[in-house]
Amino acid sequence: MGREGHIRPCSVCGTFYPADPVELRRVVESMLADADGPRNNAAHPVGVIVPHAGYAYSGPTAACAYAWLAGRNFETVVIVSPSHQEYFRGVSVFPGEAYETPLGKVPIHGSLRDALMEDGSLVQCSVAGHGKEHAIEVQLPFLQVVLGEFSMIPLVMGDQNRETCFSLGKLLASTIAGREVLLVASTDLSHYHEAEEAEVLDTRGRQRIEAMDAELLMQDLDAGRTEACGGGPTVAVMAALSSLGVPSMQIVHHCNSGDVTGERRVVVGYCSAVAWR
């Protein structure tokens, strides 16, 4: 499918988040109002890690990271997501003109997209992974509310092996160096464990995130010592930020689905984190 004129419509509006634009804005603004904002007003956010479940489950956690972005301006936002629906090699960037949510269209930053594809090997211009994928889409209403008008680069990782993760991190760092770009890693944590076991797994992952240790996080993911459906995007974003001289991240909220449902036997873990300079 060609680039020109192609808009990616919302896929999970009405299920993961409200389809009505007035209700959607109200819900997002309410979660942001309840979130803890930055304690250091001089902090300049450059990266966030945010969950991507339905807003009823992980929305308040995501809001705790997005609250840091209020009043900020970025040249563009790069969102890195896993592919839940299909497998493919490497990383795909959406070939069309924009993503659409009930709050409007978010245009693709064309020249940065071209720069990411310049070597022609890792990032491919393709609809693969973009059709029904929710992990990018659910981030957009938050960004639309806190940033207003902005452009984006939507990247979906078709595989999350070590080479792809660190190659993408290196490519992102070299491509955005010197630009005002926000990096977003879209991920949930452990899936379908009892709450106590989930907390052990998720604590280890959160420790690696706060230390900005992409290598140890990759090792733990590979060995099953922690879990994240977007572990690859998280490693790639952390590696990019480290290469750009960002020393650490701060976990700003974490919980699991049982905190919402009361079901503790089978939970999904969530966390949000912010990196700044």
Image (spheres, rainbow, N blue to C red):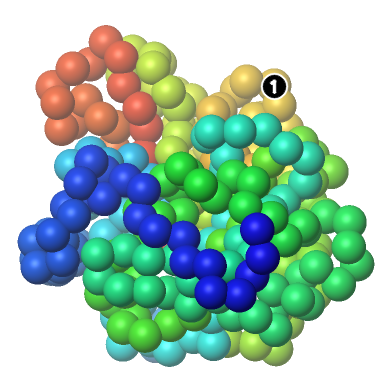
Residue at 65% in and 80% down: 110
The amino acid at mark 1 is Ala
Left or right: where does residue 210 sit relative to residue 147?
right
Disc 1, SS: helix
Left or right: where does residue 239 sit relative to residue 131?
right
Establish if 247 lies above or below 176. above
Residue at 42% in and 74% down: 106
Left or right: where does residue 25 sit relative to residue 159?
left
Establish if 208 lies above or below 120. above
Does the image show residue 10? yes
The picture quadrant where one finds residue 197 is top left
Residue at 64% in and 46% down: 128
Establish if 58 lies above or below 20. above
At label 1, counting other C-alpha atoms closer than 10 Å, the crowd grade (few under 14, some 14-19, many 20 or more) is: few
Does the image show residue 46? no
Instruction: Pinpoint residue 11: horizontal percent, then vertical percent.
Output: 36, 48
* Count of residue discs: 1
The picture quadrant where one finds residue 177 is bottom right
In the rendered view of the protein, which quadrant contains the C terminus? bottom right
Label 1, on which residue?
A: 223
The picture quadrant where one finds residue 148 is bottom left
In the rendered view of the protein, which quadrant contains the N terminus? bottom right
Residue at 73% in and 37% down: 88
